[in-house]
Amino acid sequence: MLGATDLHGDLGRPEFGTPDISPPLPHLTPTQLEVLRCVRCGLLNKQIAYQLGIAEATVKVHMTAVMRKLNVRNRTQAAIAAGQLQLVA
């Protein structure tokens, strides 16, 4: 005879139709992804601007958009989220 606890392990198996409820990946532009990659490498905004050939203020605009899309509060959280979501290498 099966008890209620015996069935709990089966509920998470795919054949029982457990829906995949992972959130959709945020849509980042190619430039936002490149800025995020640079942040993950530890570059400062000034270094990112130089490397990408854009103004430092533009880097800040991209970082603000990235943080909003990833729903994080700072660049460290953005870098961690990017790694967890495998958005950048």
Image (cartoon, rainbow, N blue to C red):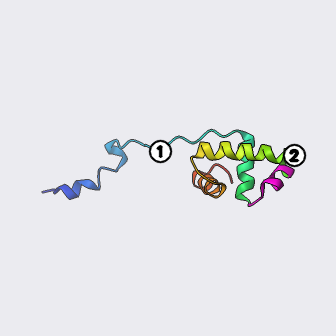
In the picture, measured across the screen, residue 24 lies left or right of residue 11, that is right
In the rendered view, would you say 89 is above or below 66? below
Residue 66 picture location, percent across and down: 66, 45
Give the distance between the C-alpha atoms of the residues marked 1 and 2, in whole angstroms.
Answer: 36 Å
Residue 45 in magenta stretch: yes
Q: Residues within 10 Å of mark 1 (few under 14, many from 20)?
A: few
Pointer 1: what residue? Answer: 22
- Residue found 82% across the figure and 48% down from its top: 56
Q: Which amino acid type corresponds to the residue marked 2 in the rendered image?
A: Gly
Q: Residue at x 21, y 58 (%)?
A: 5
In the rendered image, residue 84, in percent from the top left (x then y), is placed at: 57, 55
How packed mark 2 is, by other alpha carbons closer than 10 Å (few <14, some 14-19, many 20 or more), is few
- Nearest-to-viewer mark from 1 and 2: 2
Instruction: Name the amino acid, label 1.
Output: Ser
Between 41 and 73, which is closer to the camera in this rendering?
A: 73
Q: Secondary structure at mark 1?
A: loop
Residue holding disc 2: 53
Magenta stretch, residue numbers: 42-50
